[in-house]
Image (tube, rainbow, N blue to C red):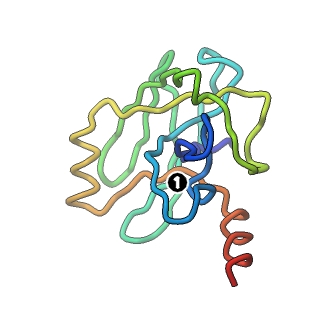
Amino acid sequence: MESILYLSYSNVSDGLVFPNELSEGVYSPGMWVLQSENINATNELYDFDAVDENKLIKLNLSKIQNNYFQVDTRKYGKINFRLHEIYYRYQNYVGNSNLINPHLKFFQLVPIDIPKLSNLCLEKGFFLVGKIDEEMNKASLQQRV
C-alpha cells in the first residue's frame, strides 16, 4: 500500500524534499502529500504513519469521496482531510530519494478541522507524521560519523 509522505520546501531550489535533505541547521515548513497521476485518480487507501504514546503506528487514510479523505485513529476519533493541488513552483521533488515516483504528481492533504488536530497533539500527544525516507537518515548518520 502506498504511504502518505511528509515533505518540506527545499531551502536550495524550488521544490520539495524530505526534511532530512534540508541543509544542516535549516528548518522548513512541511506538508503531508500523496502521489498520483492526477487529483481524480488517487487510491482508495493509504498508510499514514502516526505517533501515539511515543510509539510509531500505522493508520489507514481512506478516500471517502472525490478529494475527501479520512483517518480513523481508533482511539481519538476520525480526522478528515481535503486533497489540494500544490502551487506549481513546488510540485516537483528535488531531492535524492528512491521512494519518489518521478512520473507522478504530488497533492497536499490539508486537515479540515485544524483545531481538533492541534488539540490531539497538545493534549493527547498524538501526531500524524507521514513517511520519510529512513534509508536517507541512515546514510546521513553514517556520513556524519
Residue 70 figure quarter: top left
Foreground pick, 9 / 127: 9
Extreme bottom residue here? 145
- How busy is the neighbourhood of tag 1: few (under 14 within 10 Å), some, or many (20 plus)? many
Could you say where residue 58 lies in the image, as x and y percent from the top left?
A: 53, 55
Quarter occupied by the N terminus = top right
| In the image, residue 86 above or below residue 51 | above
With respect to residue 93, does 125 lie above or below?
A: below
Residue toward you, 1 or 22: 22
Q: Residue 50's spot in the image, x, y percent?
A: 46, 56
Q: How many marks?
A: 1
101 left or right, relative to 11: right
Taking the spot 75% from the left edge, 50% from the top edge, the residue there is: 96
Q: Amino acid at mark 1?
A: Asp
Image point 53% across, 42% down: which residue?
9
Relative to 68, 1 lies left or right: right
Residue holding disc 1: 49
Q: Which x, y percent locates residue 141?
A: 67, 76
Q: Position of residue 103 (x, y in %)?
A: 79, 28
